Amino acid sequence: KETGQSGFRLTLDQQVEAERAFNLLSPLGISLREAADCAVRHLRPAGGEITFAQLRDRLLAEKARQNRRPASLQSLSFHVRVLVEHFGADTLVKNATAENLRQWIDALQRSGGGARHMRNFVTYSKQFFRYAHAHRFIGDNPAQLLEAPHVETKPPAILTLSEVRRLLRTAMAPEHAGLLPAVVLGLFCGLRSEELARLNWAKVDLTKRKITISPEIGKNRGARDWRYPVIPKGAVKFL
């Protein structure tokens, strides 16, 4: 009578189990409904179950479809591969915990990983689990509270005139002739090393003394990130 009609819908075994669960949760201030909701969210995620290897393949395929740079995909693939190898390719992503991740990052750091190296692992781990959370493969993101170590950045070095001369003489030597264009454009036009690696002669107009840095070549991939550095007259003769 005190339990109402719901009491008749539970078998005796279910009532005993419910009472045991209530006795466990009550001192913690957690209701049976809260515990049930949490269990459903974590044990039966809305997106279904997925292994570390399956999520890795999905994430990489999606980034490739987004036309990410090969270097970016390579870096993502490397860091995620190490993550998957640690947890196990067939391990369900939903079983990863914040403590598991923290212990893994700490172990990498103890093995000699530098601050920048560790920062990359934290960044890509966050991306991995953020993707899993967005697609509802996990109830909560265990990487959300991971903190990347601080990386000290040094101001760019400025070469002296004598250092520039020595660098140019070295690049002009027959055995280093292939490096001369990159050295000249880096010195005189301020191109970054990543930009030089992606640049080709079709983007260099020696007649107009202009370089076209498109979003695919530049540091940022924004649609408006176009630059047109001017090549000084004195630099053209080296090219």
Image (cartoon, helix red, strand yellow):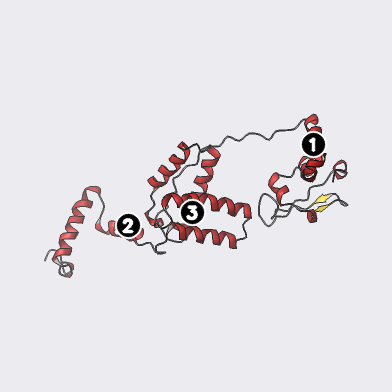
Would you identify the image quadrant in which residue 102 lies?
A: top left
Q: Mark 1 highlights which residue?
A: 170
**Amino acid at dot 1:** Thr
Describe the element under mark 2 as helix, strand or loop: helix
Would you identify the image quadrant in which residue 186 lies?
A: top right
Q: Is residue 106 above or below residue 223?
A: above
Q: State yes or no: discs 3 and 1 in contact (Cβ < 8 Å).
A: no
The tag earlier along the polypeptide, 3 or 1, is 3
Q: Which mark is residue 38?
A: 2
Q: Taking 5 as reference, is 155 left or right?
A: right
Describe the element under mark 1 as helix, strand or loop: helix
For the N terminus, the quadrant is bottom left
Q: Mark 3 highlights which residue?
A: 128
Residue 188 visible in this rendered orientation of the protein: no
Q: CA distance from mark 3 to mark 2?
A: 22 Å
Q: Taking 144 as reference, is 188 left or right?
A: right
Q: CA distance from mark 2 to mark 1?
A: 65 Å
- Check the image and name the residue furthest to the front: 175
Q: Residue at x 19, y 59 (%)?
A: 18
**Amino acid at dot 3:** Phe
Q: Is residue 168 above or below residue 66?
A: above
